[in-house]
Amino acid sequence: MRIGQGNRPPFSLYCRALFMLLAASSVFVIKNLVKTRLPTGFGEFSLHLYAEHGKEHLALVKGDVLGKTAVPVRMHSECLTGDIFGSRRCDCGDQLRHSLQYLGRAEDGILIYLRQEGRGIGLQKKLEAYNLQDQGMDTVEANIHLGHQPDERDYGIAARILRDLGVASIRLITNNPHKVEALQAHRVTVESRIPIEVGQHRENLGYLRSKAERMSHLLSFRERMPEHHELAFIEPLIDQLVLAGSAEYEFPFVTLSYVQSLDGCIAPEGGTGWLSGSKQVLTLTRYLRSHHDGHLVSVDSLLADTPGLSERYGAAEETRWVILDPELRITPDCNVFAEAAHPPIILTAATAHPDRRALLAGCGAHIIPIYTSSGGDIDIRPVLAALANTGIRTLMVEGDGHLISTLLQQNLVNYCVITIAPRFTGGLKTIEGSSAADAAPLTITDCQYQPLGADIIAFGPVRYG
């Protein structure tokens, strides 16, 4: 069967005409049966239950969306095998989880959960299609062989839910351009598309390529590093960074990455040095930097003359350096000017010497003033907002204890990647300052542990309160 223009799936003229007739009629009536508060590990939402022609659909709503424009929306079709059982045949479960993490960070947003299993063909036919795929058919061929269209979902349901919620316009989280077109056909204003290319791995690669080649899904199949097999465990964070790159938040997505000893120190006695000598951890650090827009370090870490530091910081990086330097100690001969791919951003005190500021600015540095309280604490929120305005939407932080404490205490860290080295050292503790005890309790949700060389990596998204 010939694939239509642009590799779109085949739809008969009769089906199109019938769809348009029904969409324009009053046949579809959707009812909001109940609304309730739903606290989750991703944040607090309100859950709306809708019913239409015997089927129940859900809308998970973050914040107040009434009358709002550019609301991020994920229109997610039920996938029992992926959403509940974590099937690796598809990317549905990963898309659901990452969408919830994304919306949990947003001021407002909606996840519409449509009960349209198997792209509308039902669970039994979907499982039969799995068997056909194991025999060599792709996802489109299997559906057609079973007497179905490649995609039989009705997105008009979602359009009516959005109208009931009173949303003025949306940004749709999807890789599927047909979803955008379908909502626009139902008079929903879609301002932009947010890519959600997540959960790629060996088991679902053929399925994803079929979606791209046969159904016009916009997938790039990002390249992996040669060490990917060893670093595959950190892919959930990389997926979040892809989503965050399309975000329009006030602050960047902040990944906190540091090495600590078994006794909780981030540097040996004397306050400098790197606790892990593992080449694998160094590779992980560089891999993470390459996936962030910016890389924040303190000037002390950058300038300290300690073994291994030049290897950590000397190579040119595509990510942009952000250097916390309140006293403006950095000089134009620092290797971040000579070797980095982009001029650095320097965070310095508003009272820093104007001649030194002008000298560094003349070398290409972008200077952002920082302000401190009477106790010396950095007012970090306007700094992060300024970084977001420069285009840095994802920021990896490898700062000192004071910077780490500031970010954690002000609830500004989104993800942690903590390397635990098998050493007892004494020295600089991770959390500094008397106010640490008063900070809101925080945990790493869905915390996972991965051996890497002689070290252990603890990682996961951060939840406060």
Image (cartoon, helix red, strand yellow):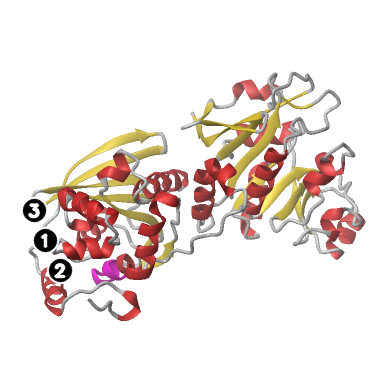
Which residue is tagged 1?
A: 28
| First in sequence: mark 2 vs mark 3 | 2
Bin the neighbour count of mark 2 within 10 Å (Cα to Cα): few under 14, some 14-19, many 20 and up: some
- Could you tell me the amino acid type at mark 2? Ala
Measure how far apart labels 2 and 3 are at the Cα level: 14 Å
Q: Residue at x 75, y 62 (%)?
A: 342
Q: Where residue 307 sits: x, y (%)?
A: 86, 37
Task: Report the mark closest to the observer, 1 or 3.
Answer: 3
Residue 235 visible in the displayed image: yes
Measure how far apart labels 1 and 2 are at the Cα level: 8 Å
Q: Residue at x 41, y 34 (%)?
A: 41
Q: Where residue 324 sits: x, y (%)?
A: 77, 45
Tag 1's secondary structure? loop
- Could you tell me the amino acid type at mark 1? Phe
Bin the neighbour count of mark 1 within 10 Å (Cα to Cα): few under 14, some 14-19, many 20 and up: few
Which residue is tagged 2?
A: 23
Figure quadrant of residue 172: bottom left
Q: Residue at x 71, y 46 (%)?
A: 296
Q: What secondary structure is the stretch in magenta mostly built from?
A: helix
Whether the residues at callouts 1 and 3 have beta carbons within 8 Å, the answer is yes
Q: Please, is residue 143 above or below residue 104 in the view?
A: below
Q: Is residue 182 magenta?
A: yes
Depth order, front residue of 8/157? 8
Q: Is residue 168 magenta?
A: no
Q: Where residue 215 sits: x, y (%)?
A: 32, 68
- Span shown in magenta: 181-187
